[in-house]
Image (cartoon, rainbow, N blue to C red):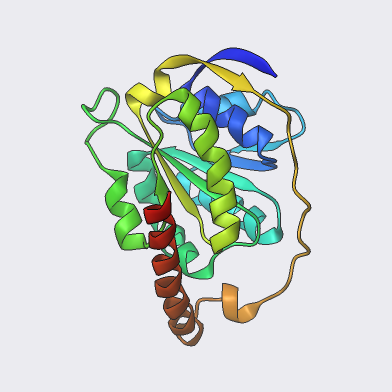
């Protein structure tokens, strides 16, 4: 086990890699850019800069539905561009773990406005984790993949400028890639026409109660 001096964003990348990440997509924007830059150093990953956040989100979501662990990363204003697929992904769920990393910018150090992604988790009915240090970023992203697969949901992971760019000694371990599930063509789960969406909405509400119970126990 190696100990490295990592920023919060770098720790996220290393943690996701160790958790068996296979596909990562993003659109660059401070304070999130270093996440994908760090992941690009691992040659056994599919890492893509996309033309915008919506495209990046949909590529990563498609990978998760197809059965491989994936992540999407953006800054807070970038999430606005990806809101359409995000809201629907809350209903469809996933097959392999899908983590949505959003770096907020309190104080507007490099942004045109302030936004708080915690509100997004409420109205999208998605779980959200918020690390307070690079070490926690490493551990939380690993846990996010587990929660995603256990509860069939995308998981939001909120960073802020200071946590993204703070550096700390972080212990790095071995990469473990979970067994890839076989893709199943499930129309009622993944095609959100109104009839299917109504049934999925009921499952989303049940999932939310389970996630609340998880939060209260941990």
Q: Residue at x 29, y 31 (%)?
A: 105
Between 21 and 174, the residue placed more toward the observer is 174
Q: Is residue 74 above or below residue 99?
A: above
Between 138 and 52, the residue placed more toward the observer is 138
Q: Is residue 152 left or right of residue 194?
A: right
The answer to whether one can see residue 41 in this image is: yes
Give the percent coordinates (x, y) of residue 65. 64, 61
User: In which image quadrant can residue 42 be found?
Assistant: top right
Q: Residue at x 22, y 36 (%)?
A: 113
Q: Residue at x 70, y 42 (%)?
A: 22
Give the percent coordinates (x, y) of residue 23. 66, 43
User: In which image quadrant can residue 158 be found?
Assistant: top left
Q: Residue at x 21, y 27 (%)?
A: 107
Give the percent coordinates (x, y) of residue 8. 46, 24
Give the percent coordinates (x, y) of residue 174. 73, 29
In this view, the residue farthest toward the bottom is 195
């Amino acid at each position: 086990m190696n100990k490295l001096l990592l920023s919060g964003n770098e720790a996220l990348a290393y943690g996701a890699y160790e958790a068996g990440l296979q596909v990562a997509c993003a659109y660059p924007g401070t304070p999130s850019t270093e996440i994908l830059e760090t992941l690009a150093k691992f040659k056994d990953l599919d890492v893509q800069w996309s033309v915008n956040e919506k495209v990046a989100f949909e590529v990563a979501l498609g990978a998760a539905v197809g059965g491989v662990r994936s992540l999407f990363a953006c800054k807070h204003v970038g999430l606005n561009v990806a809101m359409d697929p995000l809201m629907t992904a809350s209903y469809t769920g996933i097959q392999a773990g899908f983590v949505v990393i959003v770096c907020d910018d309190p104080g507007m150090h490099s942004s045109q406005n302030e936004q708080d992604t915690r509100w997004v988790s409420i109205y999208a009915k998605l779980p959200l984790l918020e690390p307070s240090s690079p070490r926690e970023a490493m551990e939380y992203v690993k846990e996010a993949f587990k929660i995603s697969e256990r509860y069939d949901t995308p998981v939001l992971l909120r960073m802020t400028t200071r946590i993204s760019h703070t550096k700390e000694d972080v212990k790095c371990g071995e990469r473990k890639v979970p067994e890839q599930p076989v893709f199943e063509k499930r129309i009622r789960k993944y095609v959100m026409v109104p009839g299917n969406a109504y049934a999925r909405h009921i499952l989303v509400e049940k999932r939310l109660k389970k996630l609340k119970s998880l939060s209260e126990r941990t």
